[in-house]
Image (cartoon, rainbow, N blue to C red):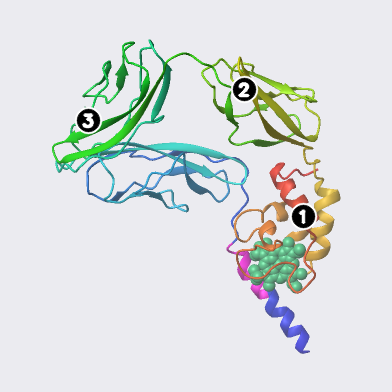
Amino acid sequence: MKKIITICLIAVAVYACKQEVISAATSAPSNFTYSVSSTTITQGTAGTSVAPTINTGGGKVAYTLSGAGISGISLNTNTGIISWSNILLPGTYTISVSASNSVGSVTATYTLIVNSNGIVTVPTGFSYSPASATIVVNTAGSSATPTITNGGGTITYSLTGTIPTGVSISSTTGIISWTNAVAAGTYTLNVKATNSAGNTTTTYTLTVNATATVTAPSGLAYNPASSSVTQGTAGNSATPTINNGLGTITYSLTGTIPTGVSINNTTGVISWTTAVAIGTYTLNVTATNSAGNTTATYALTVAAPAATVSFSADILPVISSNCSGCHSYATTYAGITGHTSGCNSIQNKINTTYCSGSRMPLGATPLSTSFITLFNNWITQGQLNN
Ligand code: HEC
């Protein structure tokens, strides 16, 4: 008697929960826009964007900021509303927001223009990248443009201290130039950036070698130094960094080179075609100049694509036998696809990392890790009714 009452309560709880269920996405979100997509503010003013409009594709949409984060700009991941704090410096900020559901994603951009409040502060963040150059005598050249936060004022650049003959700076861009008259030596150039509120300094090192003595290359590195891909996916590595020892570098792969893998002799970029077989490969890269060589390795992993999951053979029997006693939806395709999104989704509730209520199946042995992987693959493959 006592047992029957308990079952009734569980049934009521299930029914109550089912009202909350968010339906599964049937397509990627689309038509994602901010009706007012640009705002101009005065420095020191916090604010928020309008709520975006979107076609959710039938599922729950999560919003994220794409690209490098900007300090002072944040996003509500549920509503897509962008907020900015009063710390933003004058400038134009292009904010890219991505909206995704279980099927795909779409992006929209928002422009925030921050006008100066007229208060000039001392410039900060002054640097050159790279902050040095190594040349041989009789070679004219110039530095990269430095980065700086201008504090809302106009910057004037200058060189201070002893300035070697042949070296100068553009007072407006901060670019340091040298003519072919600079004598051999190592020079630490002191650079000052000034606005009406004050100044900030940095240094730049110019090394002028007497002769073009080529030394063996060093410091060959890939960042990242590995890639993991699914078989049938072509791709390539990043461009490696290297100290060229003042020589011309030729890159090559040594040892056993898997079919479909090659290297660009001049850039060092490693490429792979769709033909590379499944496996884990350690690629040996040699960079050579006239004085010697240096080596690095790159790890390429090519994994088998997940087999197509069968709904009728792999999914339905397991869900049906473990869950249908308490959930009537657990016996049909429509019932199961109706529960594949959000916190109340099946893939969430059967996992160790479930985000609300209890782990399913309630009060029984958890489903195997391999089934959980299978279920996730079925969703990734588009919830086929096969
Ligand atoms: C003994 C009964 C029982 C069994 C067996 C059971 N559940 Fe549940 N289920 C519940 C109850 C009660 C809730 C509501 C409380 C909670 O969320 O923890 C629930 C909630 C859920 C929810 C979220 C709300 C909803 O109704 O959609 C999902 C999804 C779910 N279960 C999936 C499963 C799956 C998948 C299985 C089988 C692997 C399973 N359950 C087995 C009783 C059960």
Most common SS among magenta residues: helix
Residue depicted at 51% across the width and 18% down the height? 246
Specify the quadrant of the image occupied by residue 380: top right
Indicate whether residue 18 is drawn in magenta: yes
Question: Which residue is labeled 2 in the image?
Answer: 268
- The type of residue carrying mark 1 is Thr
Mark earlier in primary sequence (3, 1): 3
- Residue at which label 3 appears: 161
Query: On the rendered image, what quadrant is the C terminus found in?
Result: top right
Task: State which quarter of the image contains the N terminus.
Answer: bottom right
Viewer-nearest residue: 236 or 88: 236
Query: At x 82% / y 45%, what residue is drawn?
Result: 310
| Amino acid type shown at disc 2 | Gly
Mark 3 against mark 2, which lies toward the viewer? Answer: 3
Q: Name which residue lies at 18% across and 32% down.
A: 154
Q: Is residue 274 above or below residue 310?
A: above
In the image, is 182 to the left or to the right of 105?
left
Mark 3–mark 2 Cα distance, whole angstroms, equals 41 Å
* Total numbered circles: 3
Q: Position of residue 351 (x, y in %)?
A: 70, 61
Res 326 visible? no
Image height of 219 relative to 324, above or below: above
The answer to which of marks 2 and 1 sits earlier in the sequence is 2
- The verdict on residue 275 being magenta is no
Which residues, given as a range, are shown in magenta? 12-20
The residue under label 1 is: 332
